[in-house]
Amino acid sequence: MTDKDKYFQESISSGIPTYYFLLRDFGVGKGCKNFVETGTHLGNGVQYALDNGFDEVLSCEMMQDRYQHCMNRFKDNDNVSLWLGKSDDCFSEMVNKLTEKSCFWLDAHAEGGGVPTFEELDVIKNSSIKDHTIIIDDIPVYFGGQVAELEQKLLSINENYIIEYFPVDLGGERGRVDDYELVAYV
Ligand SMILES: C[S@@+](CC[C@H](N)C(=O)[O-])C[C@H]1O[C@@H](n2cnc3c(N)ncnc32)[C@H](O)[C@@H]1O
């Protein structure tokens, strides 16, 4: 079984999304101390990061009701910091707080917020830490014709990045979709 299939099978048998296991092995497993997310939504990514044992969890969400929901959901977690706003407005501040290797889950897109991933990668590129793990969701949905450009941008942050793609189970008729999540790591 390839690694890609291993993560897919783990996800199917546990009912937990593939990215939980990617955070475990390419985040915590590669020495990342903190978790940084764009697009908090209802807080599932934050919870998976807490379950994986990251020291600090930082996340931003542009929708007030979702932000409020998560402020309430994580009110007892001192190590969770949430921002209300588009990543254009708060991602630099989030990244500037990092003093250690961290794991990024770039998952802000659509619903009127655009696809700010290239801008987010520019912010990471301009920061001093060059060995973060970067995981990007929904590759076929938002980056269909731009995968080469995305890889180039990642390699401009660190030419030693290894870039891999993993399948997810979208359920129902869609089922398994290959190359859905991109992981860049050293
Ligand atoms: C796919 S959901 C995120 C799911 C979440 N990361 C998780 O793992 O459970 C995408 C979220 O990104 C938010 N969003 C979209 N564009 C954004 C932007 N430019 N800045 C911040 N949040 C954004 C949406 O409101 C939505 O809640």
Image (cartoon, rainbow, N blue to C red):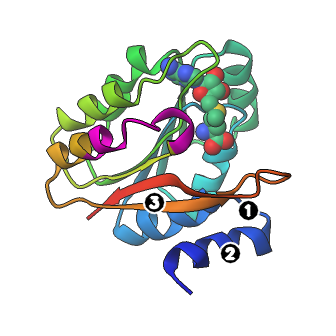
Q: How far apart are the two marked residues, 1 and 2, measured between alpha carbons?
A: 8 Å
Going by the numbered disc 2, the residue's amino acid type is Glu
Location of residue 43 (image quadrant): top right
| Quarter of the image where the C terminus is located | bottom left
> Residue 109 at what x, y percent from top left?
55, 26
State yes or no: Cβ of the residue under disc 1 lies below 8 Å from any atom of ligand 1: no
Q: Which residue is mark 3?
A: 165
Residue at x 34% of width, y 66% of height = 31
Q: Nearer the viewer, residue 39 or 173?
A: 173
Q: Which residue is mark 1?
A: 16
Contact (CB < 8 A) between labels 1 and 2?
yes
Going by the numbered disc 3, the residue's amino acid type is Tyr
Up the image or down, 175 lies above or below 119; here it is below
Residue 79 appears in the figure? no
Image quadrant of ligand 1 equals: top right
> Residue 139 at what x, y percent from top left?
50, 43
Question: At numbered mark 1, what does the secondary structure look like: helix, strand or loop?
Answer: loop
In the image, residue 64 lies in the stretch drawn in magenta: no
Residue at x 67% of width, y 49% of height = 47
Whether residue 156 sits left or right of residue 22 in the image: it is left
> Residue 124 at what x, y percent from top left?
26, 36
Whether residue 75 sits left or right of residue 84 in the image: it is right
Q: How far apart are the two marked residues, 3 and 2, measured between alpha carbons?
A: 16 Å
**Between disc 1 and disc 2, whose residue precedes?**
2
* Segment tinted magenta in the rendering: 140-151
